[in-house]
Amino acid sequence: TSLCENNANTNYSATGSANATTYLWSIYPAAAGNITGTTASATVDWTNTFTGIAKISVIGINACGNSVSSDSLTVTINSLPVKPATPSGSTVLCENNINTTYTTTGSSNATSYSWSVYPSTAGNISGTTTSMTIDWNNTFTGIAKIAVKGVNACGSGVVSDTLDVTVNPLPLKPSTPTGSTVLCQGSAATNYNTAGSTYATAYLWSLSPATAGSISGTSVNSTITWNAAFSGTAKIAVK
């Protein structure tokens, strides 16, 4: 008969022994658990961490002594999966990142794996092997925690230590550039600026049409050198 590691208490019984008034039950090895009962039935309180083969037997007792021991019942205690290694993979990403793969070196006794990400709003996980893929939520930013546990017919093992993944935000939309909006053809270089963008570390300025001139600057300030031959409407933007 087979059980799983950390099994609930289990009852065993014998058909009885003629002339017996009481019974003495035994379990081998003793480390497998504690057996209680003095009738034709007994209960084993299994040791939570025991795995392997246990043998249960019983003898009948009366005032004259003990009977020959019964044949033993062999009980196989199957192992739960052991704690997997901490997942590995990219730990610093950007908002709206492409799908990302994470792996673990595995768990002894596991036949499949159950992956999790916290908070669940960070993305959706797919995969039941030693590797999985996260489809990140396009708007998620912050810390996500990834963990995995092994699974087999006996249940789930201890969950791994978590891998922390930092998902950094993209810059927010900058404010509309400010500066002179009416100029004369052939004007001198003109400065424009923006109030900035949260999370931005640099800025990319653009001028349309490109024939209007050239724009320089990577901060909240920029300078346009106008094409002397240009006249008409130019559009300035920044991100």
Image: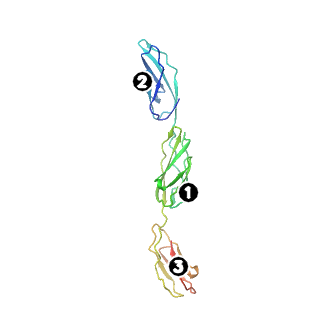
Q: Position of residue 180 (x, y in %)?
A: 47, 83
Q: Is residue 40 above or below residue 86?
A: above
Coloured how?
rainbow
Disc 3, SS: strand
As helix, strand or loop, the secondary structure at mark 1 comes to loop
Reply above or below: 154 against 86. above
Q: Residue at x 50, y 39 (%)?
A: 155
Label 2 element class: loop
Q: Earlier in the sequence, mark 1 or mark 2?
A: 2
Which amino acid type is shown beneath numbered disc 3? Answer: Lys
Q: CA distance from mark 1 to mark 2?
A: 58 Å
* Residue closest to the far top: 64
Query: In the rendered structure, are the residues bearing label 2 and label 3 in contact, judged by CB atoms less than 8 Å apart?
Result: no
Q: Residues within 10 Å of mark 1 (few under 14, many from 20)?
A: few
Up the image or down, 219 lies above or below 190; here it is above
Q: Disc 1 and disc 3: Cα gap in Å?
A: 36 Å
Q: Which residue is mark 1?
A: 99
| Residue annotated with mark 2 | 37
Quick one: label 2, few (<14), some, or many (20+) residues within 10 Å? some
Mark 2 residue type: Gly
> On the image, numbered disc 3 is attached to which residue?
235
Q: CA distance from mark 2 to mark 3?
A: 91 Å
Given residues 19 and 88, the one toward you in this image is 19
Instruction: Using a 10 Å C-alpha cutoff, classify the residue at mark 3 as few (fewer than 14 neighbours), some (14 to 19) or many (20 or more).
Output: few
- Do residues under tags 1 and 3 come within 8 Å of each other at their CB atoms? no
Residue plotted at (58% across, 79% down): 210
Residue lying at the far front in this picture: please name it. Answer: 15
Q: Nearer the viewer, residue 129 or 83?
A: 129
| Three-letter amino acid code at the position of disc 1 | Asn
